[in-house]
Image (cartoon, rainbow, N blue to C red):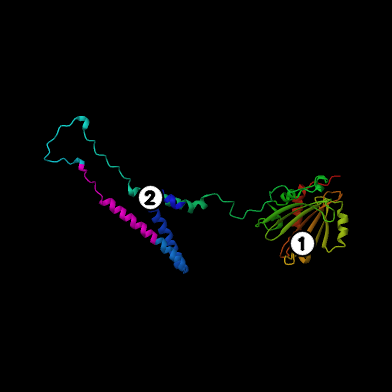
Amino acid sequence: MLGFLFRLLPFWVREPLFIVVGSVFGVRIMYLALRDGEGTAAAVGAVFLLFTAVRVHAVVRALRARGDRAPAASTDDVVPAAAPPQPRPSAERRPAAAVPEKEPNAGLQAFAAVAVFAALGAALWLGPSLTPSDGDGTPRAAACPRGPDEEIPGAYTKTAHAVTGDELCKALNRPDLARLLGTPGETAATASGTSGTALLTGGKVARPEAEVRFDTYTVNVSVTYNELSMAQYVKLMEFGEETDVRRLQVLGRPAVLSSGHTMAIEIDLGSGGTGGPVGQGPLARTLSVALDEEDRGGYGEFTVWSESGALPDDSALLDIAEAVLPAIPERAG
């Protein structure tokens, strides 16, 4: 297609363009080939230079032909000397010789072609530096998915003021989340939200969940709309493997901090089945908070962990909870 367009150009526009393109690419490729010792690239560069030499030869021949060309005298204008002038009627006068059409200036065409090519090259070269960039060049933070609305389980319609996974993701994926974690220079790599239900409830208990992953830490927030109070929640910890348990209050609501290992799950594709938990994952720190000050049931869990096992200060979890909890309506009485 490009070759067809070049053929439509006038000779004095097309040939200078061929010469400029061929010489620039040929010299550049030959330089890189000699620097890197690439024989194939050197052959390609030689082809470009040979092509350029052929075009230069064609232009030189055309210029010489234009210089040697002289207007030939028309034989119709020569009157034999021996022939006496014959009177002719005015109606039979011979038409005047046609004035030859003036050819375009070859030098101006060549200069215009090179100038246009130089302008295009400058635009391509300087374009990225002249166009506005996204911020300061840092990677753009991940946003919560905006795909088609997922099917919301019936438990959400039966639970007053229950938030969905999408709403929870937007509440968690805050612009200052990295700063709250103590890593202000990082941006969110992934963000997601799901509107699921709690395990072993037959789909009757809504449990939305959201997760935002950074290079250092991963933050997960879930809300369980059951009837379990924080007092009962703490009693159940006595039968679990949670450590470093500390009771406190967050925004006037009962809360508890605890530590526990995540589970590492392996999927065995060779046997066609999935394996269960094969070991402990990295240590995680969780802040569980009641959904209202009266502790009438239900709770939110704010969990953070890292692949290296390092954890931020507990103050980071408290700051995140205080920032996200206002977006979660309190449990209706």
Question: Closest to the observer: 120 or 299?
Answer: 120
Residue 256's image quarter? bottom right
> 47 above or below 7?
below
Please state the horizontal and vertical placement of residue 193, each as a whole percent of the image: 73, 52
Distance in Å between CA atoms under marks 2 and 1? 70 Å
Please give the residue where the numbered disc 1 appears in the rendered image: 284
**What secondary structure predominates along the stretch shown in magenta?**
helix
Please give the residue where the numbered disc 2 appears in the rendered image: 13
Between disc 2 and disc 1, the foreground one is: 2
Magenta residues, start to end: 50-75
> 215 above or below 326?
below
- Which three-letter amino acid code belongs to the residue tagged 1? Ala
Q: Secondary structure at mark 1?
A: strand
Please state the horizontal and vertical placement of residue 213, each as a whole percent of the image: 70, 57
Please state the horizontal and vertical placement of residue 137, each as a whole percent of the image: 58, 54
Question: Closest to the observer: 270 or 294?
Answer: 270
